[in-house]
Image: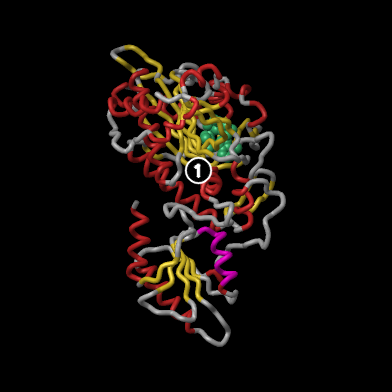
Amino acid sequence: MFFSKSFIPILKNNPTEAKIKSHQLMLRTGMIKQSSAGIYSWLPLGFRVMKKIEQIVREEQNKVGVQEILMPTIQSSEIWKESGRYDDYGEEMLRIKDRQNREMLYGPTNEELITEIFRSSVKSYKSLPQLLYHIQWKFRDELRPRFGIMRCREFYMKDAYSFDISDDEALFSYNKFFLAYLNTFKRLDLSAIPMAADTGPIGGNLSHEFIILADTGESRIYTDKRIFDVDSSRTTIDKDSLTHLRNNFEKFYSVTDEKFNKDKFEKNVPEEHRLNTKGIEVGHIFYFGDKYSKPMKASVDFNGKKEFVKMGSYGIGVSRLVGAIIEAKYDNKNEIMKWPISVSPYDCSILPITNKNDNSSLEKALNIYKTLKKNNLDILIDDTEENLSSKMKKFNLLGIPYQIIIGNNFNENKIEFKEINNDTKYISLNEIIKIIKNKKVH
Ligand code: ATP
Ligand code: MG
C-alpha cells in the first residue's frame, strides 16, 4: 500500500477527549472514528489489526474442535422471555420494535438463541458434545461507555457455547476452551492470566476471566506471581492433560476483586509472591449447567430418559483486544508503539527520502516493495514528500514493527533496517526477508 493513497487520517496531536493511551493512539493514527457515543467506525489501519486478531481467535477455536456458525445481531424477545432474562437484563439491552410491533432486540450475548438452535435439531446424547462459536457484533447500552473501543456500546465478540450430557463431560469442554484461550493470547503476544471470577448476569458457578496486566485496566486483581510461569505448551486435548493444566493454574491464588478474600490471599500467597494490581478483561468463560437448558427445555434422549443438556459459554472481546494490545505494548517513555507481528496492520514499512528533483530513492524503494510483496509480506511504503525524520516519527506511532530506510547512501548489500525499539542493522534484502518471515511463523 502506498501511504499517499491510503486512508490513514493521522491527527497532528493527541485528541484531548481520550484518557488512556490506546484510545489516544487509535484516534491519533486513524484506526477508528467515533460515530456516536460508544459507537465507532473501523478505518483501514484498525480494521486490519482487528481482522488479524479475529483470524487467530478463529484458528484456535477450530483447533480444539469448535465449529463456526453465524447468528444474527437482531433477536426476538420470545426466547429471552423463556429464559427469564428479558426483564433481568435491564437497560443494557437495546430493545427495538419492528413494523408489526414485535419486540426485537440487538443481542448483547447469545445463550438463548444458541439454545433455541440446539434444541430444535439435536435429539440424542450421541450427537454430544456440540461446541459452536460465532464472531459477531454485540450491543450493550453501557451506562458509561469510555476509553474508546475498550468499553463501548457496539463491540465485536467471539462467543462460543458448549452442550454436554454430564457435568464431567461439560468440564472437559470447559477445559478445552481454557487451553484455546491460553494459546490465543500467547499468539497475540499477551500474557493473560486466568482468574477465578464471579459469573454475573450469565449465572452459574464456575468461571474464569482472562486478564492482562495494565494500569489502565478496570479490573482489580489479586494474584500469586508464580502463576505467570505455568507452562501450557505440552498440554494435549485429552481429559487428563487438561485437568492437569487447570490444576497447575489453580494451585496459585488468583482472583478478581469480587472474589477477593484478604485472609485467604495472605494465607495462601507468601508475601514476596503477592501481586495486587489492575488488569483488562479480554476473555471470560462460564460453566452454568442447566441454567438455560431447563427453562428453555433443551434436552436430549439418554437411555430412554430426557436429560437437560449442560452448557457453558465462552467470550473473547475481539475488538477490545485491539486496545488491550496497545495498552500492553506501548512504550510510554519513547512514545513508540510496536505491534506484535501476528496482528500488525503491515509487516514492514519502507521509508525513502523523497524530493521533487530526484526520484532515485523512491525508485529503489519501489523495487524493494515489489520483492517483499512477492514474498507475501504486507508492506506500507511512504511515498509522500515529507522529510525522512517526520516519516520516521509518524511510523514510530503507527507501530509497524520493521522499517526499511532508504537514504542518500543506499547500498543494496547494506540496507538500513530497523526493528522498532531495536538497533539499526545494515543487511541485504534477503536477510531482511528471512528475519521477518522467521518472526511471522513464531
Ligand atoms: P466487563 O466486566 O468488562 O463489563 P463482561 O463481563 O460484561 O465484561 P462478558 O459478557 O464476559 O463481559 O463478555 C465477553 C468479553 O467481551 C469480555 O471479556 C470483554 O473482553 C468483551 N466486552 C464486554 N463488554 C464490552 C464492552 N462494553 N466493550 C468492549 N468489549 C466488551
Ligand atoms: Mg466479565
Q: Dividing the picture into quarters, in which one does residue 423 lie?
A: bottom left
Q: Give whichever of 139, 196 is nearer the camera.
A: 196
How many callouts does the rendering have?
A: 1
Q: Nearer the viewer, residue 86 or 371?
A: 371
Residue 402 in the image, given as x and y percentages of width and height: 45, 62
Q: Which quadrant of the frame does ligand 2 lie within?
A: top right
Q: In screen coordinates, is 391 left or right of 294?
A: right
**Under tag 1, what secondary structure?**
helix
Q: Where is residue 91 in the image (x, y as percent from the top left)?
A: 67, 29
Q: Is 288 positioned to the left or the right of 165 in the image? A: right
Residue flagged by tag 1: what amino acid is it? Val
Q: Where is residue 211 in the image (x, y as percent from the top left)?
A: 50, 35
Q: What stretch is highlighted in magenta?
A: 389-399
Q: Mark 1 points at which residue?
A: 318
In the picture as drawn, the residue positioned furthest to the front comes out as: 272
Q: Which of 90 and 104 is in front in this view?
A: 90
Q: Position of residue 74 (x, y in %)?
A: 56, 37
Q: In this view, does 293 lie to the left or right of 320?
A: left
Picture residue at 54% right of the left edge, 58% below the top: 44
Asked whether, in this view, residue 316 is left or right of residue 9, the answer is left
Residue 366 in the magenta stretch? The answer is no
Asked if the magenta segment contains residue 393, the reply would be yes
Residue 11 in sight here: yes
